[in-house]
Amino acid sequence: MEMKFALLSADPSHKVRFKINCEQGDCTSFLNWVDIWGGVHLSFEALRKEDNSYLKGFDVVMMSGHPHYIQDVTRIAGELKGTEAVTMFYPEGSLQLYDASMYQFHPEYYEAWNACDIVSSAEEDKLGYYRSYLKGNTIARFIHVPCTAGMTEGKYLLPREKKQRYSVVYGDNNPNHPGVAIACAEKLGLPVVTVAIEPGRIADFKKVFPGIPFHPQTKLSQAAFLRVLGQSAVHFYPTEWIGTARQQIACAIAGTPCIGNHDSHTQRRLYPKELAFDIYDIEGMVGAARRLLEDGEWYNLVVREAFEKAGFYGLEATKGRFMEAVEAAREMKRTRLSGEKIEIVIEERRRAPGVLTEAVG
């Protein structure tokens, strides 16, 4: 399937194609869409300084929802509204999309949604919210970043008998309540492997939980993290973030049961209700973990079903949802412009470790 695809984000790389190496970077990042569609990455900052007319030559222009560039999203989508290019708003995980109070209402977000042809919901069960704020020919769909083929094919799946009795607390993907996860592990007598948590913070936790062995790890690549997670006996994920959680998906493809937030649609899709709790219900989470550790048959059933359901986030399924949204948006476009698509010159730029860039003429 050939498609001229552009992804616009806060990342400084401009007019480059790149591949993310799972052994060195995070291949489930939304930036991976560039590799999936053989597209090009463009920087919002650079686009502010140049003529953007060449964007009309793309089939799909995806724009991440970084707050600093939200007005750029509105402007660019408006410029492409009457063209054949389909524009897609793709929110970043840290972006506050919902209003916790009257003082957190940001109309700029909703203006950006309505300017685009597609709003990609970060939450599977929040489409009604998006649609209530869409007043024109904008559609809302749940798409999500896909897992790589190796993940859903069992490359990182480790059976129960090969796991070790420890739990993982990840500082990057579990930033809200790592202390809750550590408290759960302490009640079970489980050592804790900490990932990307500062040494000083670990020292603070040791003062509160002096009996727990801590095994610190620096920030890991996606593949390295999956191997560490896969060897752990059980995982606690008491996060307030209920958007599509890659951490819960990682547990499913690594064969480690995840005990998490009962409000998370990812938790509900992948795991039985017996593993879903209020994020402060330490006794409930510990009880669920104890049952898993003592009942091998129940443990294996949970793991098997979670792995099967993780196919929903697989490459082909996710690409299918993406293209369904694009085709629906194309049908809703009111006007189309004819003419030859403009070719662009793609230059190579340096990126962070784990990301391979490719210069294209």
Image (cartoon, grey):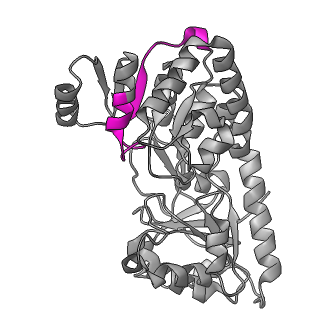
Q: Residue at x 64, y 78 (%)?
A: 132
Q: Quadrant of the C terminus?
A: bottom right
Q: In the image as oriented, which residue stretches furthest toward the right?
A: 331
The one of 69 and 57 positioned closer to us in this rendering: 69
Queried whether the magenta region covers residue 178, the answer comes back as yes
Give the quadrant of residue 153: top right
Q: Residue 317: horizontal and vertical position, in percent?
A: 76, 48
Q: In the image as oriented, which residue stretches furthest toward the top?
A: 161
Q: Is residue 283 above or below residue 351?
A: above
Q: Quadrant of the N terminus?
A: bottom right
Q: Is residue 220 above or below residue 109?
A: above
The one of 150 and 279 positioned closer to us in this rendering: 279
Q: Residue at x 34, y 29 (%)?
A: 183
60 to the left or right of 263: right
Q: Is residue 27 visible?
A: no
Queried whether the magenta region covers residue 182, the answer comes back as yes
Q: Residue 115: horizontal and vertical position, in percent?
A: 60, 84
Q: Residue at x 53, y 13 (%)?
A: 163
Q: Residue 84: horizontal and vertical position, in percent?
A: 74, 81
* Magenta residue span: 160-183
Q: Residue at x 79, y 77 (%)?
A: 330
